[in-house]
Image (tube, helix red, strand yellow):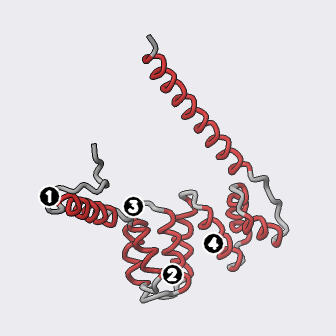
Amino acid sequence: MAGLTDSVECGSGIGKWYRLVIGTVLGLLLSSCASNLDQGNASYAIGQYDRAAQYWNVAAAAGEPAAQYNLGLLWEQGLGSTPRNADQGLYWYYQSAQRGYVPGMVKAGAMLASAGRLDEAVSWFTLAARWGNMEAVNNLRVLNARVPAADLMQMRARETEQANLMVMDAAMKAASKVYMSTLP
């Protein structure tokens, strides 16, 4: 039996048209599913900062930490019609950092350090360093602060490994069950 992508000749080339229609519909569906974050990133990449801000504001309002971080960049650097405003930039870096976004932690720490708020900066750098971020580690060294082990990153790796083992175990049990059902 032919699949959707097989070239099936049906008289006057209906199979080719069928493939073209299905491909077009799937392409439209996939492009319409692109996230606001992705659309903002694409707009930013071609210098359309105001359009990027529109997409990122929607994603940031939905709690997307990478979009919150990106809004921080727009405010900090004053790109497009977004005026340069360090306080607004820091606000958005905080938002992303509080959602666990490590680049937001590092940027918040850097802005705080530049403002002389070293205790707060060290706190953010320490948390980012625990996730294994080397920029945060280097910033802690510059500030003569204690550099922690990357324990959060190690914990995540162990959790991921455990989850992968559980999936493998379930797949092996399912495959064994199927195999056993084929035996006489």
Q: State if disc 2 and disc 3 touch (CB < 8 Å).
A: no
Name the outermost residue toward the right. Answer: 144
Element under label 4? helix
> What amino acid type is highlighted by mark number 2?
Trp
How dense is the environment of label 3, judged by Cα within 10 Å: few (below 14), some, or many (20 and up)?
Answer: few
The residue lying at 68 percent from left, 56 percent from top is 131
Left or right of 102, for residue 38: left
Image coordinates of residue 64 in percent, x first then y, are: 46, 62
The residue at which mark 1 appears reads as 11
The quadrant of the picture occupied by the C terminus is: top left
The residue at which mark 3 appears reads as 62
Question: Real-space Cα distance between discs 4 and 1?
Answer: 63 Å
The residue at which mark 2 appears reads as 75
Left or right of 167, for residue 154: right
Question: Real-space Cα distance between discs 2 and 4?
Answer: 13 Å
The residue at which mark 4 appears reads as 107
Q: Nearer the viewer, residue 120 or 168?
A: 168
